[in-house]
Image: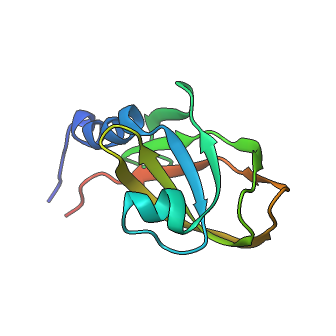
Amino acid sequence: MTSYQNDLMLDAALIWVRDRVTKENVDNALPSTYAEATSTYMLAQANLGSSGATLADGDSNGRKLTMAARNSVSVTTTGTASHVALTGSTGSTLLLVTACTTQALTTGNTVNIPAWKIEMADVST
């Protein structure tokens, strides 16, 4: 049996994130709210511009949204980074959270956030 879905279905979800994200937050725990991502657990925060996320075909199938690398992001709180959270200022929304390689960060230093992707696979049977 074979399956099909239109790329626009996956694009709709990824575009929803892309169009709402304004900040990329480096956190020391898994946030479940906007306040946790942007305050309670936040170690560093990068502002995203209009070219901060790119929609394309997935690596093996489906679609992906690639978040551009952010370099020299100021660390505002000392702690161990464990998650990256995407937040939007409209409605103070927590959009998406992913785990990252753990790294000790110190206030006053900077951190580089490498490019990473959100990938949604094609439907399978």
Position in image of residue 38 (x %, y %): 51, 56
Picture layout, residue 71 above or below residue 84: above
Tell which of 72 and 7 is nearer to you: 72
Picture layout, residue 69 above or below residue 3: above
Q: Can residue 60 be seen in this view?
A: no
Q: In which quarter of the image is residue 68?
A: top right
Position in image of residue 28 (x %, y %): 61, 72
Report the colour scheme: rainbow
How many numbered badges does the structure rendering display? Answer: 0
Q: Point out the residue furthest to the top here.
A: 50
Tell which of 85 and 36 is nearer to you: 36
Please indicate whether residue 82 sits to the left or right of residue 15 in the image: right
Please indicate whether residue 108 sits to the left or right of residue 70 in the image: right
The residue that appears at 30% across and 38% down in the rendered structure is 16
The residue that appears at 17% across and 54% down in the rendered structure is 2
Please indicate whether residue 52 sits to the left or right of residue 92 in the image: right
Position in image of residue 42 (x %, y %): 59, 62
Q: Is residue 6 visible?
A: yes
Position in image of residue 113 (x %, y %): 70, 51
Quadrant position of the C terminus in the picture: bottom left
Q: In which quarter of the image is residue 1?
A: bottom left
Q: Point out the residue furthest to the left here.
A: 1
The residue that appears at 21% across and 40% down in the rendered structure is 9
Please indicate whether residue 114 sits to the left or right of residue 83 in the image: right
